[in-house]
Image (cartoon, grey):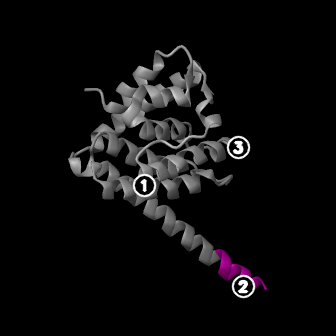
Amino acid sequence: MKGRLITALEAVRSLPEITLGKIVEQVEGEALLILCLISILPFMQPIPIPGLSSILGLIVLLQGLGLMIWQKPLLTQKMKNVVISHDRFETIYFAALKFSSFTSKLSAFKHPITNSRFSHFLCGLAIVISAAFLSLPLPIPLSNLIPALSIFLICVGLLEEDVILILIGQGITLTIIWMTLFSYHIIKEQFQNWI
């Protein structure tokens, strides 16, 4: 059975020209989550993509804010006009197929509570934090993959109303926060010892 992510992407594939604005028009209510997923799929690999993470990270961060506060996609006019070539979209589509088959094995507990305002606020906050980390130009292996995985699991969890996927995504976000605080304290301590 096809999930809502794949169904939405298939609807977009047939468009003569694919832009972020047209994606929003095509998938309507699910546009916010689909935009997040399309933006992070290029980072679902261990090697960071220099330069691209800042731009796409900002798009995801805005969608996280949209989920938290307005419940609708946030895009500037310039972002709406961004064109995604059909070749690149095919790469995104097949990556989505691959990772959706992986998440379907994790999926275990579907519940409409995932559509509550409180759930959307928590998920939006986690997306904002992970997107902020994704946007940092860090030349470190897995620095893009870990926050992208968190965002992917949360968005697919919301699309499929799957509590388990959302909890795993939230857990990864908490790990990112802990790693950041731990690294900060170590760097601060080393800096003070050096002085």
| Residue assigned mark 2 | 192
Mark pair 1, 3: CA separation: 27 Å
Where does residue 14 sit, x and y in percent of width and height? Answer: 46, 15
Q: Residue at x 39, y 60 (%)?
A: 171
- Describe residue 156's horizontal placement relative to residue 76 as left or right: left
Where does residue 33 sit, x and y in percent of width and height? Answer: 42, 40
The amino acid at mark 1 is: Met
In the rendered structure, which disc, 2 or 1, sits on the residue that comes first in sequence?
1
Which residues fall within the magenta stretch? 187-195
For label 3, the SS is: loop
| Residue assigned mark 3 | 51
For label 1, the SS is: helix
Q: Quadrant of the C terminus?
A: bottom right
Q: Is residue 166 magenta?
A: no
Which numbered mark, 2 or 1, is in the foreground of this view? 1
Q: Residue at x 55, y 73 (%)?
A: 182
Count of numbered marks: 3
Image quadrant of residue 106? top left
Mark pair 3, 2: CA separation: 32 Å
Mark pair 2, 1: CA separation: 38 Å
Report if the CB atoms under discs 1 and 3 are less than 8 Å apart.
no
For label 2, the SS is: helix
In the rendered structure, which disc, 3 or 2, sits on the residue that comes first in sequence?
3
| Residue assigned mark 1 | 68
The amino acid at mark 2 is: Gln
Q: Is residue 156 above or below residue 127?
A: above
| Residue density around tag 1, few if under 14, some if 14–19, many if 20 or more, within 10 Å | many
Q: Residue at x 41, y 21 (%)?
A: 10
